[in-house]
Amino acid sequence: MRMPRVGVTCYASQGGSGVVATELGLNLARRGCEVHFISSELPFRLKHYDQNIFYHKVEMPLYPVFQHSPYTLSLATVMSEVATRYDLDLLHVHYAIPHTASAYLAREMVKPRRLPVVTTLHGTDITLVGQEPSFFPITRFLIEQSDAVTAVSGFLKEETIRVFGIGESIQVIPNFVDARVFKPLTDLGRRERFAGEDELVVMHASNFRKVKNVTAVVEVFARVVREHPARLLLVGDGPELVTVRDLVASLGLTDRVRFMGQFDRLEEILPVAHVLLLPSLHESFGLVALEAMACGVVPVATDRGGAGEFIQDGINGFLRSPDDIQGMAAVILELARDPDLTQQIAEDARRDAAGEFGVGCVVKTYLELYESLLSGG
Ligand code: GMT
């Protein structure tokens, strides 16, 4: 049987859903699938092409009559054109709103040819955006209309069932990491560019939205640095950046905290850390924590959501409530004082990330899903 030809749509900007979509596409292409990315911009992790990778830009024309460009319709048009021109077997969209709506329209437009739609739910498409009254009914409709729906964690599947009253058939396919790309530091000199030899390096990386609870990162760090020499590296950018900067200054931490800005190649900076702190208010998965684990960095992550599906508290990382500032600081201080414990947890973290959550296992599961859909299963 020939390998599937897949149209992939995701948000192109920084964010885990775009990372998962891009890495999945690249890995499918390596396995012989023809992968067509269809989006408004080149996805930020799409750094290399090969013969099976195609990119189709969605233009967004503005006419005086429009207040906003109807992106959903432009996307549906490009999806249907690409599906016809390249004889696509299916569309796989990441993040339900509005991508599944466009895919649904494209599927109707190309009839009678068959064009199954796979939707991967990532998180806030269900936990926040999808629950806005103006999006709730259409999110529910789009989940029902997809030919297959996957969720990145059991938590997200259960949330979908709880909130929308549908979704029993959702398949949980966890996020994944390429442990050949995300790997521990080999040159310790790289860490010394950011911190002294005796200093603990704590890192946070996110899109600095409220849900990421970045102010808690600073509060935890303030407690840690009172008792142990440490540095905080903040990677990313977003709406909370100014608030976080102000908090750092008001706590007198400016000399200890470095704002790294947006960093496309996370694998280059993550291994510099000893600890990755992710105290989100909720996190359907928390991909950066898995990427940190693959780098041998100990995750201290939120216990609200799906992170507990790959982090075992006290074994390969730590889970704490997002408002437990004292508890997160205590765990980080314990690690700072016990390098052997840190080393043990870091090794277990890497082993677990590279195993069940390694790219090979998970990409194979997606391929099996495509094959079952295409064979009518
Ligand atoms: O945070 C978001 O809402 C955006 C979304 C994204 O595009 O990065 O993040 C979600 O998808 C990631 C990839 O599956 C997950 O790792 C994140 O946990 C999830 N974010 C939340 O649930 C808050």
Image (tube, rainbow, N blue to C red):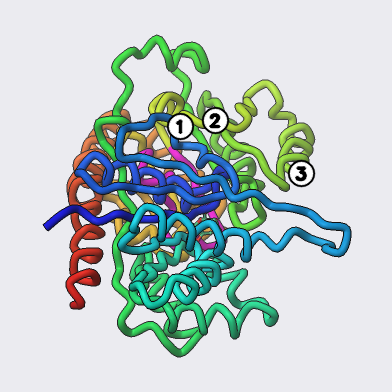
Residue in front for this viewpoint, 80 or 233: 80
Q: Judge depth for marks 2 and 3 and give the one in front.
A: 2
In depth, the one of 364 and 335 nearer the eye is: 364
Q: Is residue 351 visible?
A: yes
Amino acid type at image mark 1: Leu
| Residue at 77% over, 40% down | 242
- The magenta span reads 276-293
Q: Which mark is residue 76?
A: none
Q: Amino acid at mark 3?
A: Thr
Q: Can you say whether 17 is above or below 44 in the image?
A: below
Q: Is residue 315 above or below residue 184?
A: below
Instruction: Give yes or no for residue 255 being in the magenta stretch.
Output: no
Q: Is residue 61 left or right of residue 103?
A: right
Please name the residue shown 36% across and 40% down the image. Answer: 53
According to the image, label 2 marks what residue? 263
> Is residue 257 something one can see in this rendering?
no
Alpha carbon separation for disc pair 2 and 3 = 20 Å
Q: Nearer the viewer, mark 1 or mark 3?
A: 1
Residue 36 in the figure: left or right of residue 321: left
- The residue labelled by disc 1 is 266
Q: CA distance from mark 1 to mark 3?
A: 23 Å
